[in-house]
Image (cartoon, grey):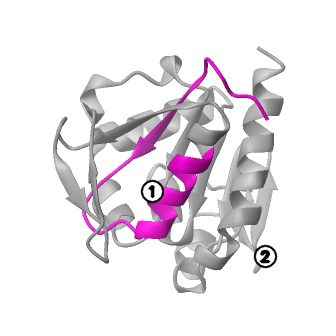
Amino acid sequence: MNLQGYKVLAFVDEEFEDLEMWYPVLRLREAGAEVHLAGPAAKQVFHGKYGVPMTTEYAFNEVQSQDYIGLYVPGGWAPDKLRRYADVLRLTREFHEAVKPIAHICHAGWVLASAKICEGYTMTSTPGIKDDLENAGAIWVDEEVVVDRNIVSGRRPPDLPAFMRTYIEVLAEYTSKI
C-alpha cells in the first residue's frame, strides 16, 4: 500500500503502550505516510509504560483534522489521559464526522467513548474496557481486528500485525476515493 503524500495524526501522552505506539507509527511510515505526533505540548518527550520515549511534534491545539487522512489512537494508560483534553475529543469527532479512518487499539476505545462516537459501531478492545464501550453504545466483539465503516479497532499487542495491515488497507481505500 502506498500512502506517499498523505498524513496521519497520532495522539501521544504519558504511559502509552510502547508496542501499540511505535509499531503502528513505523508501519504507517513504511507504507509511505507522514505521521505527525501530537500531544498536550509540542516538542515534549513522553514515555511509554516500559520507558520507551517519543517526542511530539505538535500540540493538540496546533493541528487541524482536515490536514490528515486518518487518526491513530494508541493503547496503554495514555487514553485515560487523552480523553480529558477538549482538543482530542474535538479532533476525534471531526475525523469521525468527515468519515475519515480512525484506528484504536486496546484501551484507546476510551477516547472514542468520551468523544461519543461509538453508538451503533461494532468494535473490539482489551476485554478490560468492554463494558465502557458497550455503555457508550458499541457492540463489542472479541476479535483481533474489527472494521465498522470508518473505525478500525484492535485488541492488544499480539494483534498488531493484523490490525495494522487492516488499517493501512482502509487508509489506502480511503485515499483512492479522494
The relative height of residue 82 versus residue 51 in the rendered view (above or below) is above
Q: Which residue lies at the image location 65% right of the left edge and 66% below the top edge?
A: 160
Residue 168 image point, x, y percent: 73, 43
Q: Along the line of sight, which residue is nearer the eye, 129 or 26? A: 26
Q: Which residue is mark 2?
A: 143
In the picture provided, is 45 more to the left or to the right than 76?
A: left
Query: How far apart are labels 2 and 1 at the CA level?
Result: 20 Å
Quadrant assignment for the C terminus: top right
Specify whether residue 101 is painted magenta.
Answer: no
Q: Residues within 10 Å of mark 1 (few under 14, many from 20)?
A: many
In the picture provided, is 112 more to the left or to the right than 164?
A: left
Residue 129 image point, x, y percent: 53, 79
Q: Which residues are magenta?
A: 1-27
- The amino acid on which the numbered mark 1 sits, given as a three-letter code, is Val
Q: Along the line of sight, which residue is nearer the eye, 119 or 149? A: 149
Residue sticking out furthest to the front: 30
Specify whether residue 12 is painted magenta.
Answer: yes
The relative height of residue 78 versus residue 67 in the rendered view (above or below) is below
Q: Which residue lies at the image location 52% right of the left edge and 74% below the top edge?
A: 132
Q: Which residue is mark 1?
A: 111
